[in-house]
Amino acid sequence: MSRLEQPASPQPPISVAPSLEWSPDAEEDELAEKALTPERRLLCMIVRQLTEELLRATGLDHDQEPGRRSTSHVRQVAMYVCHVAYSMPMGEVAQAFGRDRSTVGHACRMVEDRRDDRAYDTFVAIVERMASAVHLLAGKRI
């Protein structure tokens, strides 16, 4: 029997480690599972109110009819600012606003897309600065 015809010696089976699926939002999802504190919810509602009042005061809402569209626009800006200024995970922002996490992601993309407009960018920057001031006034890490 030639060397090529010899039966192969049995090989031990190769153990395969279980695959771990990673998603870019995996860490954020873990953080989002914790309960939203009442203080953080309150911060989000303050940002929403600030956004609405500033939008009216600046006149940037003049091109929008009152109602659902302007309400959702205010909410989008407020969700974006809470996510950016407070470094809140999207899941936590979603809880605060009673929305789905994907809605917060959509809101953030919409606001980012509109920031090319100089007036709109200035408006969002003002809301961000005011939100940061509110956070400082809270006097503790929330």
Image (cartoon, rainbow, N blue to C red):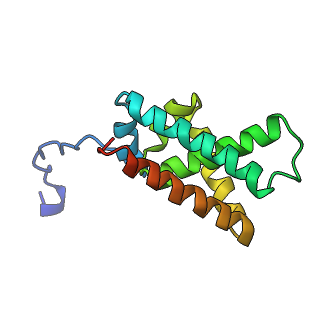
Would residue 57 appear left or right of 2 to someone viewing this image? right
Between 54 and 28, the residue placed more toward the observer is 54
The residue lying at 43 percent from left, 50 percent from top is 86
Residue 120 occupies quadrant: bottom right
Would residue 106 appear left or right of 37 to someone viewing this image? right
The residue lying at 50 percent from left, 51 percent from top is 131
The residue lying at 46 percent from left, 32 percent from top is 41
Give the answer, above or below, for where 132 lies relative to 141.
below
- Please indicate, yes or no, whether residue 21 appears anywhere in the rendered image: no
- Please indicate, yes or no, whether residue 37 appears anywhere in the rendered image: yes
Between 75 and 14, the residue placed more toward the observer is 75
Between 112 and 41, the residue placed more toward the observer is 41
Residue 40 occupies quadrant: top left
The residue lying at 10 percent from left, 49 percent from top is 9
* Quadrant the C terminus occupies: top left
Residue 31 occupies quadrant: top left
Between 31 and 42, the residue placed more toward the observer is 42
* Quadrant the N terminus occupies: bottom left
Q: Position of residue 5 (x, y in %)?
A: 18, 56
